[in-house]
Image (cartoon, grey):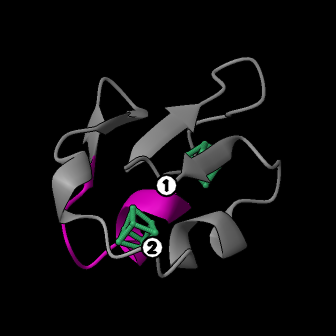
Amino acid sequence: MKIEINYDECYGCNACVEACNKNVLIELDDRPVVASPNECKFCLRCEKECSTDALKHERIA
Ligand code: SF4
Ligand code: SF4
């Protein structure tokens, strides 16, 4: 899984980090970072919680 966070759109609410129960996203210096993209189940809970569309997922082969 390729996960991109647009830090121009992200305001560091960390709702996405809390939404992810796979610990794919972690908080670092008040910003979300992608820690383990291979654990992502593509549930898109994190994207739904993001009010700015800063998160984008892309399936990669
Ligand atoms: S899509 Fe689901 S598993 Fe993947 S990072 Fe978002 S909340 Fe976590
Ligand atoms: S939910 Fe969106 S705005 Fe909030 S920390 Fe995550 S990417 Fe940034």
Q: Helix or strand or loop: what does disc 1 sit on?
A: loop
Question: Of label 1 and label 2, which has the lower sequence position?
Answer: 2
Front residue of 36/19: it is 36
Query: Mark 2 = which residue?
Result: 42
**Three-letter residue code for mark 2:** Phe
On the image, the x and y values in percent for residue 59 come to: 49, 55
Image disc number at residue 59:
1
Number of other residues with Cα within 10 Å of mark 1, as a class: few under 14, some 14 to 19, many 20 or more:
few
**Magenta segment range?**
15-25
On the image, the x and y values in percent for residue 8 come to: 75, 17
Left or right for 50, reference 46: right
| Distance CA(mark 1)–CA(mark 2) | 8 Å
Left or right for 8, reference 49: right
On the image, the x and y values in percent for residue 44 come to: 56, 74
Q: Are marks 1 and 2 in contact (CB under 8 Å)?
A: yes
Q: Is residue 41 magenta?
A: no
